[in-house]
Each structure stands twice: as structure tokens, then as C-alpha cells.
Image: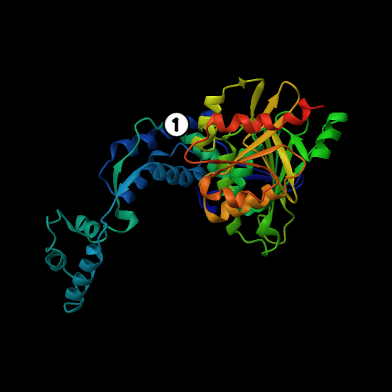
Amino acid sequence: MLTAALRVYHWDRRSSSISSDRLEDAALPALEPALAVYRERVDQTRGQVRNAARRALDGLRPDRVEPVVKLLDDVATYEWPSSARCAERRVEVFERAAGRHPLLEAAAATELLAGFTPPPADQAEAVALLYADYPEFHRLAAFPADYAAAALRADYDLAQAQALLYSATRVTVEAGRDFKHILRYARLARLLHRVERIQGEPGPRAARRRRRRVAPSPAAADGGYRFVLDGPNSVLRRTRAYGVDFARFLAALVRLGDWRLQADIELRRGWRPFVFALSSADGLGVGAAPPPEFDSSLEEAIARKFGRERGGWRLVREGAVLDVGRSLLVPDFVFHHQDGTEVLLEIVGYWTPEYLAEKLGKLSAARGVNLVVAVPRHLAARAGRLPATVLPFKRRLLLRDLLPRLEAFRQPRAGR
């Protein structure tokens, strides 16, 4: 990511709007010479490579040069001494030089630096060896041959948007689908958040869902969901450190589709916040890999074995949202039977104690739904207190264990 000092943005005080800088098509040719510098200068020091890249970017707008060089540096691979020998050598040289101060002749300096193996070709190389552990003297080891101008532009556009979020005091995301992924990304970025429905589902079906405290799939909802991410920025005197978490969140968010983001940006304390708006239609993160369909191999295996339909049951991935007190829970699977029976399956995998406590706390608040909770065998007794059917498993879920539990929810219907 870029530092705040390297961000480039455009703002309009009259409309209170702000936007991050993006490279236009005309800027792409100006990037090619800098890319060539990094490909051709392997084994040179970081300082030499960066200076050459700056000269090669003379066709680029000046305020964009340093951000581009920083991004190229992030892609490059550098090597440097891992031992403390450089620091020891510097101490030795300085101690020897102290007794002969001042050193006014080049020959005397060369004599002091003669202890290197192999011996340096000149004083400049001697200094580079003496300070080889300093970032400026790290040596370029490799640069990806397939990293082209289009990829550099995509990284630049995303990095500038991330850097603008360093000054965000509040971020709102509206999503029509990928609800669970956004919720997961907010947690991984350590963002405090709350979630609300944008628009309810009309008609009798909505009334039934409200009684059961189950919301439809976000993809099927008319308005989707709204995530409000403010957290510490609203209580800890607007600390800038939290903005880095917003930036991490954005890097994950751009992998998804059908979202809209709005952020309040406070460029200077005391100023009225500017509004920064983004959406999936803006094309940030072009080429970024989509998120994995499944959170774990357990989920992937059961979905593959069950198939789309089996024994009158149809499997839907993340097809419902449970309202569990002040938070929401998205079960891993929903099973719909052709007779109308609906059963939710949540898989509790091998995670940290904190994750487990949070997960079981949410599940304990789930009421009025047909719920199967799959847990490792050693957690079966603890999960037995949940208002759900418990499905213990050893290493993987077995259909012969799952199907009878699904069918058990249909038995009361058969007797009517």
C-alpha cells in the first residue's frame, strides 16, 4: 500500500466530494520505461534502481512518479544481509577512523575500507557493502517478467483509493449479494460494524420469515444489506490508524460484485468531511481473483457429495440470514424439500477459542428455525445445549449422518 504522503486525489469543496486519482489510458506508455528499468537492473541497489525509474518516468505527471516507484518496489524482490555483520563492520571502521580523525585524503579512507572480502572496486562500492543492510543498498534480485503496464495501473488505482481511506471516519457499504464475504472481510480487517436490511421483502412470505427470524438470501433481496463501519474512529478521537484497516477491507471488497461504498473523508481536522463514493462498476481491482466459493474443505466436500438435489432435497449455498440478537448469522447451507420443509446447516470447523465462543453464542440465539449444527466430536457435548440438532463429525461430514437429520424435520408433517 501507499503511504498517506503519496496519495493523489481531487476534491470539490462546493459539492463536498472527493475522488482518488486514476491513471488514464494515455498514461500507460509512460509506465513502460520504468518497468524496463526494474526488469533490466537486477543486482543493482534499490537506490540506483529507484533513481533510474524516476528518470524513466519523465513523461508521467510529476505527482504520480513517487507512488508509481513505490508500487514497482513493492512488486520487486530485494535481497540484503540477514546477519549483524554489517553493523559490526561499521563499528570497526568508525573505531579505526576515530584515531586518525580527520581523514582528509582519499588514500587514507581507502586503507580503512580495505578489510572487505572481496575487496570493493571503489569507495562507492565500499560504502554500499558497509551499509548493505540499509534499504537504500538492498539489491534487486528479481522482478516478475509478466508484470505489465495494465497491472501497474490497476495497482495504482486501487492503492490511491486505499490511501484516501486512511482519512475515513465512517464507511458505508451497500451490497446486493456476497453478503457473507463482505461480513468476513470486515472481521478480518478488524472493523467494528453493524448490518441492516435496506429494504424488506413484501407480502405474506415476508411475514412468515419475520416470525421465523430468517431473512432471504441477499441475492434474492430487493435492496440487499447495508454495512456501517465506523468503530473506533467515532470513539477514539478519530485515530488515523483505523484507516489502514479500511484500506485492507477495500482490497478484499473489490474482488466482489454488486456493491456501493461511501466514505466520509476528513482531510484536515476541523474541516467538513468530504464524500468519497465507489462501486463495483468503477472497476477497481481488475484481474483480482474472486473469493473462494467455500470457506473450508468441509463445506466443499459436503456440497460436492450432496449435489444440487438428493432425495427430494435441494441444496442452496448461503441461502438465508438469521437474525441473532444484535448480529446476523449466515448458515453455510439451506436444504429445501419439495414438500416445503426448510432446514439450515451450519458447520463449526477447527478454529480459535475466540471464534468458537462467538459462533456458539450466535447459534444459541437462533430460535424458531430448523437448524442442524455440525461440530467436531469433542465439541458435541458443549453444542448439545444449543437450540438445534447436533451433528458430530470426526474429520468430514458423512451423508449417511446428515440425511436422517434432515428427514427428521419432516416427520411431524407426515403424521398430520
Q: Left or right: where does residue 341 sit relative to residue 36?
A: right
Closest to the observer, 15 or 409: 409
Residue 21 in sight from this viewpoint:
no
Q: Is residue 365 above or below residue 199?
A: below
Please report the residue visible at 29 percent of the width from the left and 54 percent of the height from the top: 137
Image coordinates for residue 331, horizontal then vertical, percent:
65, 38
Please report the residue visible at 83 percent of the width from the left and 39 percent of the height from the top: 211
Image coordinates for residue 403, horizontal then vertical, percent:
61, 29
Q: Is residue 85 above or below residue 350?
A: below
Please report the residue visible at 50 percent of the width from the left and 30 percent of the height from the top: 301
> In this view, which residue lies farthest toward the right?
203
Closest to the observer, 207 or 122: 207
Q: Is residue 59 above or below residue 274?
A: above
Rate crowding at label 1 as few (under 14), some (14 to 19) or many (20 or more) other CA atoms within 10 Å.
some
Write down the quadrant of residue 71 in the picture: top left
Q: Residue flagged by tag 1: what amino acid is it?
A: Ala
Q: Left or right: where does residue 195 sit relative to residue 249?
A: right
Q: Could you tell me which secondary element the residue under label 1 belongs to?
A: helix
Closest to the observer, 176 or 8: 176
Image coordinates for residue 119, horizontal then vertical, percent:
12, 56
